[in-house]
Image (spheres, helix red, strand yellow):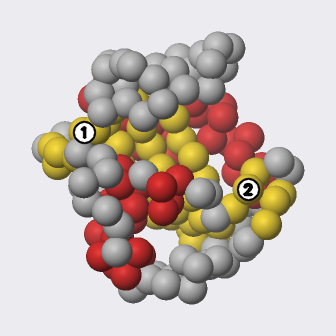
Amino acid sequence: MTQIFLGLGSNLEREKNIRAGLAALNNTFGELILSPVYESESVGFKGSHFYNLVVSLQTNLSIAHLSDVLKKIENDHGRVRMGPKYSPRTLDIDILTYGNFVGVEEGIVLPRAEIIENAFVLLPLSEIAPNEVHPQLKKTYAELWASYDKNAQALWKINL
């Protein structure tokens, strides 16, 4: 089994879609470890605020098969893939890490750059896996969060 971290986000019917996405992940993979949920402004476009969280789970699926399963979950929850890269989302599920894999597999670059670029990924990741080491940077997520510019993005922890 490989431990993976996923980033989930939604800015359209946020609560409904996050809950539905988590239910689908639980039904597919079993036990999930969840971070707190954060609200943040849209990044890359003007739009409604997002709800974001990080999920950890174990899988035997390959990266490519995992990606296909996650895309199906997104599609089942109204994800529209046409249009600009940065646009509103019913449900967005990104593979952040896949064990200690570093590289490109089936067009998926891992670990995902957003881990160190976006507070809405790094903070929740540092909360559920503070002592886990970033596979490429060889620093813990707690260390990466400690050195992150906290003024770069505003986040609000919410109860979901």
Q: Amino acid at mark 1?
A: Glu
State whether residue 19 appears in this view: no
Mark 2 is on which residue type?
Val
Instruction: Locate residue 158, reporting x and y percent.
Output: 15, 43
Which labelled disc corresponds to residue 109? 2
SS for callout 1? strand
Point out which mark residue 39 bears. 1
Instruction: Give the residue drawn at x 39%, y 19%.
Output: 46
Q: Residue furthest left?
A: 159
Q: State the image quarter where residue 126 is shown.
A: bottom left
Residue found 35% across the figure and 43% down from its top? 52
Residue density around tag 1, few if under 14, some if 14–19, many if 20 or more, within 10 Å: many
User: Which quadrant of the figure contains the N terminus?
Assistant: bottom right
Say which label, 1 or 2, has the lower sequence index.
Answer: 1
In front: 69, or 6? 6
Estimate the x, y position of residue 154 in percent, counting from the top left: 23, 45
Q: Answer above or below: position of 47 versus 64.
A: above
